[in-house]
Amino acid sequence: MTSRRSKATVGHAGIDQQSTTTRIVNCPHCSGDSVYAPSNPYRPFCSERCKNIDFGAWADESFRVPENEPDPDAASRGDMSRLQ
């Protein structure tokens, strides 16, 4: 779930800008609050730890799309009914 929280920021010249919104999202790994802004180098994750855990899961190929292998018997029988 996404929510918005307002906060005042200071511009480049030290002048207060009108309230800007900071987007708070759920961390994909731990579901904790995470600031989705350039100030968070780990976005959309809340921390370096969560980002590294997710990266490790991708590297280990833990995230996979199930593959539906064609039935080899259907091809040898000439069964085209499932392809229609």
Image (cartoon, grey):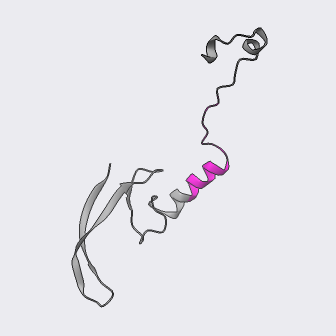
Horizontal placement of 61 versus 31: left or right?
right
Determine which quarter of the picture holds residue 82.
Answer: top right
Residue 51 is left or right of residue 6, and the answer is right
- Name which residue lies at 79% across and 12% down: 76
Image coordinates of residue 57 in percent, x first then y, are 61, 48
**Could you say which is closer to the camera, residue 74 or residue 33?**
74
Which part of the image, by quadrant, shows the C terminus?
A: top right
Q: Is residue 59 magenta?
A: yes
Horizontally, is 80 left or right of 26 in the view?
Answer: right
Q: Quadrant of residue 17?
A: bottom left
**Location of residue 15 in the rendering, given as x and y in whole percent from the top left corner:** 24, 87
Q: Give percent across and percent down for residue 36.
A: 39, 62
Whole-percent x, y for residue 74 in the image = 72, 12
Is residue 52 positioned above or below 61 on the image?
below
Query: Taking 66 as reference, is 16 above or below it?
Result: below
Residue sitting at x 64%, y 26%: 68
Q: Residue drawn at (61%, 39%), measured in percent from left and top? A: 64
Of all residues, the one furthest to the right in this rendering is 76
Magenta segment, which residues?
Answer: 52-67
Examine the image and state in which quarter residue 19 appears. Answer: bottom left
The residue lying toward the viewer, choosing from 10 and 53, is: 10
- Does residue 12 appear left or right of residue 57 in this picture? left
Nearest the viewer among 71 and 28 is 71
Let me know if residue 64 is in the magenta part.
yes
Count of numbered marks: 0
Question: Which of these two is toward me, 5 or 18?
Answer: 18
Q: Is residue 8 above or below residue 29?
A: below
Q: Residue furthest left?
A: 18
Residue drawn at point x = 76 percent, y = 12 percent: 73
